[in-house]
């Protein structure tokens, strides 16, 4: 502990010792913690007191005689011993007037010197502490190893090397203890306690606070990312809805319509899903303007598909769009084309039936010995322009079927199944009549192929209804006992012709049936959504059929 004034031997007033329990410390005590004290002073007292403690615990070396070789002041080996007058004495130049002043002593490396500050030579002057030369000692108290007496040229020898003035044990008494001011215990106890205790707790609190902030930021970033992902997914579903495009419809774009008006027209017609998202999409893509007129569009289209259809241009002013639904028979197709409202104005049933007899109306996949065109008029929406005749429209429908079958490679794929393209077309017509949801189509096709392979009657009532000319009819006992080739209740094999015009999905299902050993299917009464229950066990089929009859789904 440094003195406030090296020239003032009066000890300063001891500092008030502060000892508090952990629960009594207030915010001012943080000054002595690692966080409260300046960075350059943190732990300094603890390190200083630790060094003093280690120096105090070290054993002091035993004193040596003056004449012992190697002792301080001993003569060199082989030389005469020095006398008292030869020993170091203060020079007159080192003595300065004044109270308790002395020359700055030389640095001593003597291990007896506790702090390594003072050498053995000390100039003594008059005044307080004149007898000792130590301004911090009361008058008349000489240091150990010096004879008492007035100030003189040097200390009196004691027969051995005098101990340094501040070596341990030099001064006795309470006033000259190692810690005369009673403050080391304050620093050693209280400061170190703050330094090692509350400082670490403060650092821990700060680290926990930083972690809490980082965790909060991470949660916020994650929430924003998740919200952004859900928002983008929602937008994507509006831009490109799930499923395939649906039925073809005619959409009229009025004169002077903006791109926003076009989007609203398409949304009202069911072509796109959201007119608001369309406006944003159009601004980003900027496809340009669209012409007014009638457009052939498909329901449930993506924005890209809708724009492509608009880019193809409007139909001619006098053109008419006619839609033939999937599953229509030839008779139903003729009736639709001749309908004044839903068909083509001016078309007649007589000229349509005559067009069916023309050689140009036969499909390339129709057997030569087959006179019926059933199943060969592909169901789709057709653009009929002014001047088109009934024969032109019929030939266009047949050509479209050939194009689809060729695209699907029906010849090669039918051979892999062991059937002809025409037989696959018959199976596709049965699938078209039996399946009500697209997911069931491949499974229905598999049941048909499995029953044919096991030489089991197909027992599909739709074939008998076709024979009667009443699609969706209720069969009588006479119908079930009929010998008609379309009565698949008691006859094995396929009917002689398709029973309807299958769409592309049913043709694809007939060419790629699902894998399974199913032999039976019936409407699922539990789901009640048009789907079927498929099974290879007859008892399970009977149970499912009873449930279907109880639900009134027409499974009798």
Image: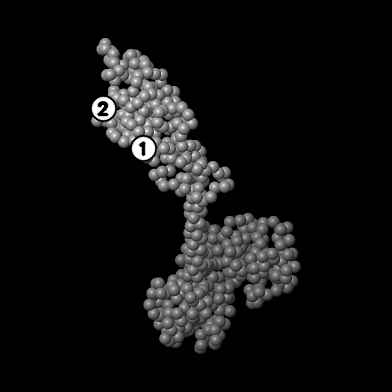
Observer able to see residue 430: no
Look at the picture and state if 198 lies above or below 158: below
Residue 361, position in %: x, y?
49, 76
Between residue 528 and residue 177, name the one nearer to us.
177
Q: Residue 131: x percent and y percent?
A: 36, 28
Q: Is residue 454 above or below residue 39?
A: below
Counting every numbered tag in the picture gives 2
Quote the CA–CA distance across marks 1 and 2: 22 Å
Q: Is residue 142 left or right of 420 when viewed as pictured?
A: left
The residue drawn where x is 46% and y is 34% is 180
Mark with earlier residue (1, 2): 1
Q: Reply above or below: 346 against 434.
A: below
Secondary structure beneath disc 2? loop
- Foreground residue among 294 and 509: 294
- The residue singled out by tag 2 in the image is 91
| Residue where numbered disc 1 is placed | 6
Residue 362 - label? none
| Whether residue 220 is visible | yes
Marks 1, 2: nearer the viewer: 2
């Amino acid at each position: 502990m440094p003195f406030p004034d090296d020239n003032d031997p009066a000890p300063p007033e001891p500092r008030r010792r502060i000892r508090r329990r952990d629960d009594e410390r207030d915010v001012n005590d943080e000054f002595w913690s690692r966080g409260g004290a300046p960075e350059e002073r943190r732990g300094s007292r603890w390190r200083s007191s630790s060094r003093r403690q280690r120096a105090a615990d070290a054993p002091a070396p035993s004193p040596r005689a003056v004449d012992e070789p190697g002792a301080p002041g001993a003569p060199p080996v082989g030389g005469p011993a020095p006398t008292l007058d030869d020993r170091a004495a203060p020079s007159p130049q080192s003595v300065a007037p004044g109270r308790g002043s002395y020359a700055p002593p030389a640095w001593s490396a003597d291990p007896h010197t506790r702090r390594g500050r003072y050498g053995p030579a000390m100039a003594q002057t008059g005044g307080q502490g004149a007898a000792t030369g130590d301004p911090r000692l009361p008058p008349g108290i000489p240091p150990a190893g010096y004879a008492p007496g007035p100030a003189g040229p040097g200390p009196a020898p004691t027969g051995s090397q005098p101990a340094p003035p501040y070596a341990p044990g030099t001064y006795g008494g309470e006033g000259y203890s190692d810690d005369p001011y009673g403050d080391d215990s304050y620093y050693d106890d209280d400061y170190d306690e703050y330094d090692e205790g509350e400082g670490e707790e403060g650092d821990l609190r700060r680290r926990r606070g930083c972690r809490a902030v980082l965790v909060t930021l991470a949660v916020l970033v994650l929430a924003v990312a998740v919200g952004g992902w859900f928002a983008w997914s929602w937008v994507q579903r509006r831009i490109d809805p799930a499923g395939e495009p649906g039925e073809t419809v005619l959409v009229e774009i009025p004169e002077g319509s903006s791109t926003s008006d076009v989007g609203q027209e398409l949304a009202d017609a069911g072509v796109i899903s959201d007119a608001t998202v369309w406006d944003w999409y159009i601004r980003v893509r900027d496809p340009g303007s669209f012409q007014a007129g009638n457009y052939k569009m498909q329901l449930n289209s993506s924005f890209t598909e809708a724009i492509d259809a608009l880019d193809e241009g409007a139909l001619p002013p006098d053109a008419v769009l006619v839609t033939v639904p999937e599953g229509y028979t030839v008779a139903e197709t003729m009736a639709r084309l001749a309908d004044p409202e839903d068909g083509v104005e001016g078309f007649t049933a007589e000229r349509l039936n005559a067009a069916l007899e023309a050689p140009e109306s036969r499909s390339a996949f129709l057997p030569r010995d087959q006179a019926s065109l059933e199943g060969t008029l592909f169901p789709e929406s057709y653009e009929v322009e002014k001047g088109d005749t009934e024969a032109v429209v019929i030939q266009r429908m047949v050509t479209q079927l050939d194009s689809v079958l060729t695209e699907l490679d029906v010849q090669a794929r039918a051979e892999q199944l062991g059937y002809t393209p025409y037989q696959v077309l018959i199976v596709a017509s049965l699938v078209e009549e039996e399946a009500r949801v697209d997911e069931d189509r491949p499974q229905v096709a598999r049941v048909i192929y499995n029953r044919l392979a096991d030489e089991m009657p197909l027992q599909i009532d739709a074939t008998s209804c076709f024979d009667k000319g009443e699609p969706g009819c209720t069969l009588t006992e006479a119908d079930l006992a009929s010998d008609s080739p379309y009565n698949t209740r008691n006859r094995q094999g396929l009917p002689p012709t398709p029973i309807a015009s299958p769409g592309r999905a049913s043709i694809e299902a007939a060419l790629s049936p699902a894998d399974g050993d199913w032999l039976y299917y019936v409407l699922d009464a539990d789901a009640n959504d048009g789907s079927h229950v498929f099974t290879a066990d007859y008892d399970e089929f009977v149970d499912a059929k009873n449930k279907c009859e109880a639900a009134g789904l027409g499974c009798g």
